[in-house]
Image (cartoon, rainbow, N blue to C red):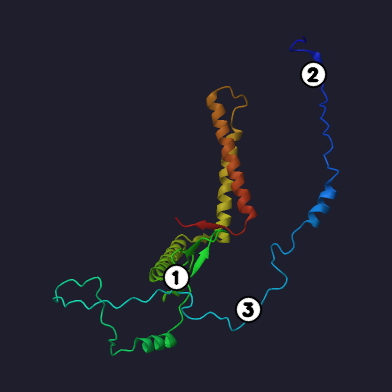
């Protein structure tokens, strides 16, 4: 018995596929085919090759297939019964009474002048031939036959007009707001004055920065130095922007 954990179990093993035996073929297959063709009945499904044509004299006549019954003997006349009594089983109704209306002619005229019967709209959903009415199925687009088909509804027109009005009012409001907050362009003199003022401020901050002590040993001196450096950087940035751009706009507050 080999142990469950072994080095030999790590090696891949080839799986041997079982070899199928060759398919069996009978040696009498050809002889069986010949016997079947020889003993095959001719005209078994399609009928005889020639069919006797019926003569035109042997046509189907009216009431020829109805059963004939022997004639009944005349029954004795029964005594008259009162008008309200129930008639007997042997009593016969009075025959030969004709009405003024000729139903045969009227039916013939109605059949000639009448419109042909329209076939029902049906659909088949299975191969067995199950039929269903098409008009009540919801598959026929009846909405296309409506009078207002293709006409834009009134509420859609009203809503579109309201949206246009709201859009126009919004655009007018935006234009008024832009006109109020329109930006003002600086003239050359104002630009030069602004640039000179920034440079003077930078000189003041730089002069104050030069008067700082060489040794910064306290926290207060350190913070004061950082503040001056930030002011100088901001002023340098503003001076550089104004010197690069000749046209400057200022927003109205």
Kindly indicate the quadrant of the structure image that contains residue 158: bottom left
Which quarter of the rendering shows the N terminus?
A: top right
Residue closer to the observer: 63 or 32: 63
Q: Looking at the image, is 57 positioned above or below residue 144?
A: below
Secondary structure of residue under mark 2: helix
Secondary structure of residue under mark 3: loop
Residue closer to the observer: 118 or 173: 118
Kindly indicate the quadrant of the structure image that contains residue 21: top right
Residue closer to the observer: 131 or 237: 131
Residue drawn 57% across and 48% down?
Answer: 198
Residue for badge 2: 10
Q: Position of residue 65 (x, y in %)?
A: 48, 74
Residue for badge 1: 143
Q: Position of residue 143 (x, y in %)?
A: 44, 70
Residue closer to the observer: 72 or 94: 72
Residue drawn 58% across and 51% down?
Answer: 196
């Amino acid at each position: 018995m080999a142990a469950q954990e072994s080095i030999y179990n790590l090696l891949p093993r080839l799986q041997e596929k079982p070899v199928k035996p060759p398919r069996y073929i009978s040696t009498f297959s050809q002889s069986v085919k010949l016997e079947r063709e020889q003993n095959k009945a001719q005209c078994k499904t399609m009928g005889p090759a020639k069919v006797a044509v019926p003569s035109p004299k042997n046509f189907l006549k009216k009431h020829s297939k109805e059963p004939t019954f022997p004639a009944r003997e005349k029954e004795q006349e029964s005594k008259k019964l009162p008008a309200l009594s129930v008639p007997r089983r042997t009593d016969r109704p009075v025959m030969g009474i004709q009405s003024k209306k000729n139903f045969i002619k009227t039916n013939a005229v109605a059949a000639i002048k009448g419109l042909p019967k329209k076939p029902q709209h049906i659909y088949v959903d299975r191969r067995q031939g199950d039929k269903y009415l098409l008009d009540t199925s919801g598959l026929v687009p009846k909405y296309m036959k409506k009078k207002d088909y293709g006409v834009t509804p009134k509420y859609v027109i009203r809503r579109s007009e309201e949206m246009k009005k709201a859009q126009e009012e919004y655009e007018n409001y935006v234009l008024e707001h832009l006109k109020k907050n329109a930006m003002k362009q600086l003239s050359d003199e104002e630009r030069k004055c602004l640039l000179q003022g920034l440079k003077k401020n930078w000189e003041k901050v730089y002069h104050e920065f030069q008067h700082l002590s060489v040794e910064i040993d306290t926290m207060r001196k350190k913070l004061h130095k950082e503040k001056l450096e930030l002011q100088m950087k901001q002023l340098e940035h503003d001076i550089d922007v104004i010197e690069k751009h000749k046209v400057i706009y200022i927003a109205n507050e």
